[in-house]
Image: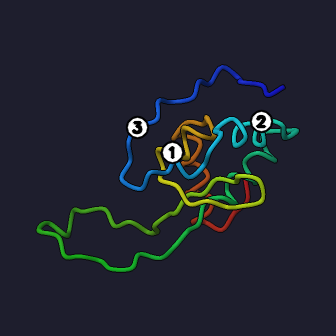
Amino acid sequence: MARNHGLKQRPQLGCARHCYEEVGDPDDVCIRLYSMESKDIQDVYLQGLIDTMDIARRRPRLNYLNSKKKSASFKYHVMVGHQRIGVCLTACLSLQRIKVKRVRRLRELAILGESP
């Protein structure tokens, strides 16, 4: 039986990519994550589902001196069985039942090339 850890699944918002429809049973995604032994193992698993990519095109900004420049772009995935399915950030958070703060920390570590 899967542990819920007090995190409820977020409502399935209608995204343009229809991410929730591709996944099927959302509990299968959550069970895999929370059946792992420790949070460190979960973080390594989650970081493996986040792809870090270089910025493809930098567009000029009106006030470019004060603007923050993104250092990377990210793609998110979930594992359904043995298949890795690309989803949006909102679907990733909802299906994994994790908070955006945890994903931000994992993204920052990925940019630095470090493991959690």
Expressed as whole percent of the image width and height from the top left, the position of residue 18 reads 44, 51
Left or right: 1 as drawn, with respect to 17: right
- Say which element carries label 1: helix
The residue labelled by disc 3 is: 13
* Residue 76, above or below 95: below
Residue 34: which disc?
Answer: 2
Image vertical order of residue 34 relative to residue 6, above or below: below
Query: Mark 1 highlights which residue?
Result: 91
Q: Position of residue 11 (x, y in %)?
A: 47, 30
Q: Identify the residue at horizontal 46%, vertical 35% (top origin).
A: 12
Q: Residue at x 14, y 66 (%)?
A: 63
Identify the secondary structure beneath mark 3.
loop
**Which of marks 2 and 1 precedes in the sequence?**
2
The amino acid type found where label 2 is placed reads Tyr
Residue at image position (40%, 37%) is 13
Residue 45: percent from left, percent from top: 75, 53
Up-down relation of residue 19 to residue 5 (above or below): below
Residue 31 as seen in the image, left or right of residue 8: right
Q: Amino acid at mark 3?
A: Leu
Q: Amino acid at mark 1?
A: Ala
